[in-house]
Amino acid sequence: MIEQIKGLHHVTSMAADAQQNNDFFTKQLGLRRVKKTVNFDAPDVYHLYYGDETGSAGTIMTYFPFPHIAKGRRGAGEASETVFAVPRGTLGYWKERFEAQGVSGLEEQERFGGKRLRFFGPDGDGFALVEVDGDNRKPFDGGPVPESVGVHGFHGVTMRLRDGGATSELLKYMGYEEVDRQGDLTRLAMPGGNGADFIDLEVLPGAAPARQGAGSVHHVAFAVKDRKDQLEVRKALIDTGYNVTPVIDRDYFWAIYFRTPGGVLFEVATNEPGFDRDEDTAHLGEALKIPAQHEHLRPRIEQILTPIAG
Ligand code: ZN
């Protein structure tokens, strides 16, 4: 069994509008934009990262805003919901805040005995806030949301699948343990993880397949400490029969990717070197960062990308 994975690293989704996406995460959810860069595989598209003050693993929500992309369709074979942890007793604050801001899809729910507030992102992205006790991850205090009620980071994700068996087996191999069941849901948790430790599998055998588009999660990334641990995880996955990409340098972390049996794309990303490798912590996310291999395209990229205010 793999022992190097420590919870989620980041979740990457697609959006239709960069400015709207930026405003939702920084002004409404109160996260910090920790990096403004481009899609390394398609550098005429932004890659925006939001998280805590430094972009700690387990707090980083990232987006590719593709202008004019069609809306995705929720269904089976995707991460259907990304869940953030907030302090106990703060869901009332969030419900009022979201109502005042016109956030859609608000619904108070209970899951595995915990209170949660479901909401949708600008493109219908599935989100929830869940109250947790004793989460020592410090919410970002430089935005409009007070630290005392702010987002600690991810709680986890929900994956909607037609068949959960093979994905559940994979997650257990990756170090997760099954901790609860309720209706169509099975909860897995990462012991000794970074706080972003929960994966809920929602198994709906008759569900139509999801169609990726704006508001869809593109992939879910898991955290490992460093490149050595990542190579060990890569070998273990390959030995088990998974088709894993070579290690790819993403400037702020190293990444490997593989497709899972339920259809969701997984990544394993390193906590090193981090988002402050090319910017001071005080100025994270301010300048447009272009990776060295695309730096020669900067004039063209700056012409194509609409500047983001704020
Ligand atoms: Zn990624």
Image: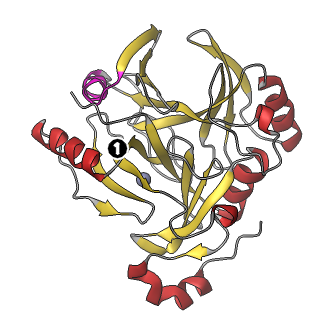
Image quadrant where residue 293 sits = bottom left
Kind of residue at badge 1 = Phe
Q: Is mark 1 within 8 Å of ligand 1?
A: no
Whether residue 156 is in magenta: the answer is: no
Say above or below: 182 vs 152. above
Q: Is the residue marked by circle 1 packed among few (<14), some (14-19), or many (20+) residues within 10 Å?
A: some
Q: Quadrant of the N terminus?
A: top left
- Taking the image as shown, residue 13 lies to the left or right of residue 101, namely left
Where is residue 41? Give x, y as percent: 39, 70
Residue at point 30%, 36% (across, down) = 4
Quadrant in which the C terminus is drawn:
bottom right
Is the residue 193 above or below the residue 218 in the image?
above
**Colour convention:** secondary structure
Mark yes or no: residue 170 visible. Answer: yes
Q: In percent of the image, x 41 and y 45: which residue is there?
A: 221
Relative image position of residue 288 (x, y in whole percent): 60, 75
Q: Residue at x 10, y 39 (%)?
A: 239
Image location (x, y in percent) of residue 77 = 38, 36
Q: Which residue is mark 1?
A: 266
From the viewer's perspective, tell me whether residue 228 is left or right of residue 11: left
In depth, the one of 266 and 104 nearer the eye is 266
User: Which residue appears at 37% of the width and 15% of the height?
Assistant: 178
Task: Give the SS element for disc 1.
Answer: strand
The quarter of the picture where residue 191 lies is: top left
Magenta span covers which residues? 165-176
Which residue is at the front of the view, 272 or 256? 272
Residue 203 in view, yes or no: no
Q: Is residue 172 magenta?
A: yes
Q: Is residue 209 found left or right of 19 in the rendered image? A: left
| Residue 148: % across, % down | 79, 32
